[in-house]
Amino acid sequence: MSEDIVFENPTRAAPKDPDLSPAIIESIERSIGERVTCRRICGTKYRCNWWSPQTTSEYDNPRMSGLLVTTHVVVKSRFISVVRNEHGLIISNAEGISSRLLDRAGGRP
């Protein structure tokens, strides 16, 4: 008995909520000299870190800053919830982020 088995080309559906990380980075407030990184955790939840240049006052030789690997430190970190509407991004503090959600998404608390 011969049956033809037909496999359809499996394609991934577009995510229900697009990743807004680049738009968040462009629009979120920051101080002069700060850099912001943003990573999607799950759905509309994101983690943003504000990075600032590390002070050279604690270096044993402040003139050697070019040889250091770590030149910025995280000065602020927030979990946010973000959605986009016709007026732009709506950013609010994320509530209910648990370590279980972060573990499933591959993030760290």
Image (spheres, rainbow, N blue to C red):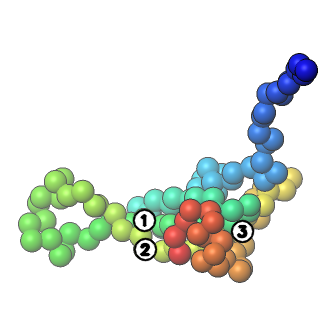
Q: Earlier in the sequence, mark 3 or mark 1?
A: 1
For the question of whether residue 79 can be seen, the reply is yes
Q: Is residue 5 above or below residue 91?
A: above
What amino acid is labelled 1 in the image?
Trp
Residue 105 image point, x, y percent: 62, 63
Q: Nearer the viewer, mark 3 or mark 2?
A: 3
Circle 2: element type: strand
Q: Nearer the viewer, residue 76 or 87?
A: 76
How far, Cα to Cα, is label 3 from label 1?
20 Å
Q: Is residue 44 left or right of residue 65?
A: right
Residue depicted at x 77% and y 48%:
15
How many marks do you count on the picture? 3
Residue found at the far left of this picture: 61
- Marker disc for residue 22: none
Is disc 1 surrounded by few (<14), some (14 to 19) or many (20+) residues within 10 Å? many
Q: Is residue 60 left or right of residue 16?
A: left
Quadrant placement of the N terminus: top right
The mark that comes first in sequence, 2 or 1, is 1
Residue marked by disc 1? 51
Q: Is residue 49 left or right of residue 11?
A: left
Q: CA distance from mark 2 to mark 1?
A: 6 Å
Percent x, y for residue 80?
Answer: 66, 70
Quadrant of res 103: bottom right
Establish if 64 lies above or below 1: below
Type of amino acid under label 3: Ser
Give whichever of 46, 54 is nearer the camera: 46
Q: Which residue corresponds to mark 3? A: 81
Residue 52, image x and y in percent? 39, 66
Left of 9 or right of it: where is 26?
left
What residue does disc 2 label? 75
Residue located farthest toward the front when viewing the structure as drawn: 1
Chain-order first, disc 3 or disc 2: 2
